[in-house]
Each structure stands twice: as structure tokens, then as C-alpha cells.
Amino acid sequence: MKTFTYTIQDEIGIHARPAGLLVKAAKGYESEITLTCKGKKASAAKLMAVMGMGVKCGDEVTVTVEGADETAAAKGMEEFFNSNL
């Protein structure tokens, strides 16, 4: 299991467009990717679950990756967060 924490920099937070890109990126990996923020937890592969978390700018998100390709998935997701959120 790999875990990293990221503070959202996007001034609108995880809204529709970046949430869609996040889900698309997460579905590219075999591993289960889970987001946790403010006591809420969601699969990164489920758009409505990600948007339902209501993540805002400045919120700290913990990303947990578990599965066969977890090292590559964690690295890829960390790069995604740094580039897009």
C-alpha cells in the first residue's frame, strides 16, 4: 500500500472538469485508488463519489493506492495532483 497527502491548490477545488480527469487517470491503473478528505472517503474511479466529497482549495487529501501496480499508480497520481489540482 502506498499513500501520499496533497493540499489542493486549485482555487475552485475538485470540481467537475478536474474530477473527470482524475477519474480517467485513476481508471488507467489496476490498483484501487482511494481519496480521503475531512472524514469522507471515495474511490478515485467513481466520478459522483469524488465530486460528492466537496473538496475545496486548501483542503488536504490523502490518496491511498493498493494493488498490483501500486508503485506506478501512486507516482502517476501524485504527478496528476501536482499538475492539475
Image (cartoon, grey):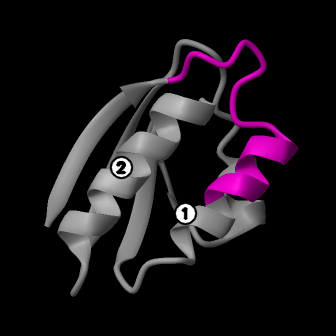
Judging by the rendered image, the residue that carries numbered circle 1 is 44
Q: Where does residue 10 sit, x and y in percent of width and height?
A: 67, 19
Q: Is residue 11 magenta?
A: yes
Residue 72, image quadrant = bottom left
> Horizontal placement of 43 versus 21: left or right?
left
- Which amino acid type corresponds to the residue marked 1 in the rendered image? Ala
Of residues 58 and 41, the one nearer the viewer is: 58
Task: Name the image quarter holding the C terminus.
Answer: top right
Question: Between marks 1 and 2, how big is the CA–CA gap?
Answer: 9 Å
Residue 17 sits above or below residue 61 on the image: below
Q: Please, what secondary structure does the residue beneath circle 2 have?
A: strand
Q: Is residue 25 magenta?
A: no
Magenta residues?
A: 8-22
- Which amino acid type corresponds to the residue marked 2 in the rendered image? Val
At x 41%, y 42%, the residue is 79
Residue 39, image quadrant = top left
The reply to whether dot 1 and dot 2 touch (C-beta < 8 Å) is yes
Of residues 3 and 49, the one nearer the viewer is: 3
Q: Earlier in the sequence, mark 1 or mark 2?
A: 1
> Horizontal placement of 15 versus 6: left or right?
right
At x 74%, y 43%, the residue is 18
At x 66%, y 22%, the residue is 56
Q: Residues within 10 Å of mark 1 (few under 14, many from 20)?
A: many
Of residues 83 and 10, the one nearer the viewer is: 83
Residue 45 sits above or below residue 2 on the image: below
Judging by the rendered image, the residue that carries numbered circle 2 is 63
At x 70%, y 36%, the residue is 14
